[in-house]
Image: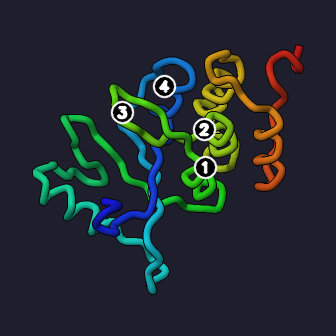
């Protein structure tokens, strides 16, 4: 999609991204945040992505593209925080293939932002904060939260 100019960058987000930083959690689909080329219209159309998918034999059902039987939802980055999350995503190895994944610090920030800060996402934030595997950079997290006007929940050890 990048080579065709449909997107400029991507990163795995949501619950699937958390799998890379903590442990598997139940999820229905894979969220892929995408940065789209600048268009003259204020509305972002995912039509070209769905056409790309159909042209490669992928089934499109509603907002999901079934890739190897897995529902994948391509989501244009809706705001500055999500755009930053994609731009600063970490490239990880997945079975010998590079894969861009939203950092745990950006996941926490995204899930702390209303209206995304549901009870379920607050639980995910708590899990990431407790995870040694996530190896959170608290200074980076504080910087992200401050720059985007978000309230930060103290780390678990500071809450005791």
Q: Is residue 9 left or right of residue 71?
A: right
Instruction: Determine whether the residue tagged by mark 3 lies in a helix, strand or loop.
Output: loop
Residue located beneath label 3 in the image: 28
Q: Give the x, y percent position of residue 30.
A: 38, 39
Q: Name the residue at 69% across, 48% down.
A: 113
| Residue linked to disc 2 | 103
Q: Are marks 2 and 4 in contact (CB under 8 Å)?
A: no
Query: Which quadrant of the rendered structure holds the C terminus?
Result: top right
Q: Is the residue under label 1 in contact with that under label 4 (CB below 8 Å)? A: no
Q: On the image, numbered disc 4 is attached to which residue?
A: 19
Q: Which residue is mark 1?
A: 88
Q: Which numbered disc, 2 or 3, marks the residue closer to the eye? A: 2
- What distance separates the C-alpha of mark 4 from that of mark 3? 13 Å
Q: CA distance from mark 2 to mark 4?
A: 11 Å
| Image location of residue 6, percent across then percent down | 33, 67
Dot 4 or dot 1: first in sequence order is: 4
Residue at mark 1 to residue at mark 2: CA–CA distance: 8 Å
Q: Residue at 28%, 67% (x, y): give it.
A: 4
Element type at mark 1 = loop
Q: Earlier in the sequence, mark 2 or mark 3?
A: 3
Q: Closer to us: mark 2 or mark 4?
A: 2
Where residue 127 appears, x then y in whole percent?
64, 21
Disc 2 secondary structure class: loop
Q: Nearer the viewer's eye, disc 4 or disc 3?
A: 4
Q: Position of residue 82 (x, y in %)?
A: 59, 54
> Which structural element holds mark 4?
helix
Q: Find residue 153 and report its image quarter.
A: top right
Mark 3 surroundings: few (<14), some (14-19) or many (≥20) residues within 10 A: few
Question: On the picture, is 133 further left or further right than 139?
Answer: left
Graded by Cα atoms within 10 Å as few (under 14), some (14 to 19) or many (20 or more), the crowding at tag 4 reads some
Q: CA distance from mark 2 to mark 3?
A: 21 Å
């Amino acid at each position: 999609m990048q080579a065709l100019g449909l997107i400029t960058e991507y990163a795995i987000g949501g619950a699937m991204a958390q799998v890379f930083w903590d442990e598997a959690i139940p999820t229905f689909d894979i969220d892929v945040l995408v940065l789209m080329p600048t268009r003259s219209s204020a509305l972002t159309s995912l039509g070209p992505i769905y056409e790309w998918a159909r042209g490669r034999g992928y089934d499109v059902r509603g907002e999901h593209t079934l890739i190897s039987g897995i529902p994948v939802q391509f989501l244009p980055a809706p705001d500055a925080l999500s755009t930053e999350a994609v731009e600063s995503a970490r490239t990880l190895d997945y079975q010998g293939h590079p894969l861009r994944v939203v950092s745990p610090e950006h996941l926490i920030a995204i899930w702390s932002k209303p209206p995304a800060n549901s009870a379920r996402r607050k639980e995910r934030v708590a899990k990431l904060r407790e995870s040694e595997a996530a190896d959170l950079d608290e200074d980076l997290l504080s910087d992200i939260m401050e720059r985007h006007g978000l309230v930060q929940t103290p780390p678990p050890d500071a809450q005791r």
